[in-house]
Amino acid sequence: MFSHRIDEHTELRLHHERHAEELFALVDRNREYLREWLPWVDRTTTVHVERNFIKLWSESFGRGEMMSLGLWNLGKLAGTIGFTGVDSGNRTAEIGYWISEDQQGKGLITRSCVAVLDYGFSELNLNRIVLRAAVENTRSRAVAERLGFVFEGIERQSEWHYDHFKDIAAYSMLADEWRNREQS
Ligand SMILES: CC(C)(COP(=O)(O)OP(=O)(O)OC[C@H]1O[C@@H](n2cnc3c(N)ncnc32)[C@H](O)[C@@H]1OP(=O)(O)O)[C@@H](O)C(=O)NCCC(=O)NCCS
């Protein structure tokens, strides 16, 4: 099973169906906070639904289409990070993440992104990784900018969130840029 240690306390592990209860509880505790920026929160209604999501993610991972990892800190699930839309023909994917409200501000997501980007560019042989965040989502945009993603522009009314469209700020990182960043 894929797992990657970030430091002595923090580890990324592929989500597994046995984590459904813990993942659901985490989403449920953070529902209002996550709902502001993520469009799937209202669909996560029960542990059973969560288990089915994890099953679908595992199947998609097997087909090489996505990768959804739990971010574990001090033995507890704290968030999720991974890739969606892996396109091996064009060698692109989109990175996404969230962390529980009480675990923000510690650099856990930025440091996890570094590991996931390394994996994407080296193991998955991606050439371009996209990061998309709502224009007003300053914390997520700060992650992109801290990592050196290049801002490409605004996708107007690009995502439907419950009862309104959100404008999305689109960023990207190319393999060469990531490697050069490592050397500098
Ligand atoms: C977006 C989100 C993941 C950002 O979380 P975050 O905790 O701000 O991001 P990080 O874990 O990288 O932490 C960065 C903070 O830790 C600090 N930090 C401490 N050690 C650090 C380190 N080693 N490396 C980087 N930052 C570090 C940074 O200075 C920054 O502090 P600040 O918030 O005071 O500016 C989080 O707000 C979230 O899950 N929001 C709800 C869902 C969401 O919006 N998901 C993204 C949709 S696009």
Image (cartoon, rainbow, N blue to C red):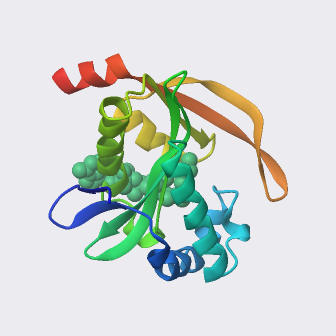
Q: Quadrant of the N terminus?
A: bottom left
The picture quadrant where one finds residue 134 is: top right
Please give the name of the residue rendered at 36% of the width and 45% of the height, measured from the top-left corner: 113
- Residue 88 higher or lower than 5, as above or below: above
The picture quadrant where one finds residue 52 is: bottom right
- Residue 51 higher or lower than 64, as above or below: below
The picture quadrant where one finds residue 157 is: top right
Instruction: Kindly tell me whether residue 139 is visible in this rendering.
Output: no
Please give the name of the residue rendered at 55% of the width and 42% of the height, measured from the top-left corner: 65
Q: Residue furthest right?
A: 163
| 83 relative to 74 in the view: left or right | right
| 103 relative to 5 in the view: left or right | right
Query: Which of 83/140 is in front?
Result: 83
- Residue 102 higher or lower than 85, as above or below: below
Query: Which of 119/106 is in front?
Result: 119
Query: Which of 174/163 is in front?
Result: 174
Query: Which of 65/177 is in front?
Result: 65
| 165 relative to 120 in the view: left or right | right
Q: Quadrant of the C terminus?
A: top left
Count of marks, rendered view:
0
Residue 167 locus on image (x, y percent): 72, 38
Please give the name of the residue rendered at 44% of the width and 65% of the height, measured from the top-left corner: 15
Residue 40 locus on image (x, y percent): 69, 61
Residue 47 locus on image (x, y percent): 61, 81
Please give the name of the residue rendered at 38% of the width and 36% of the height, measured from the top-left corner: 120
Residue 160 locus on image (x, y percent): 79, 48
Instruction: Kindly tell me whether residue 156 is visible in this rendering.
Output: yes
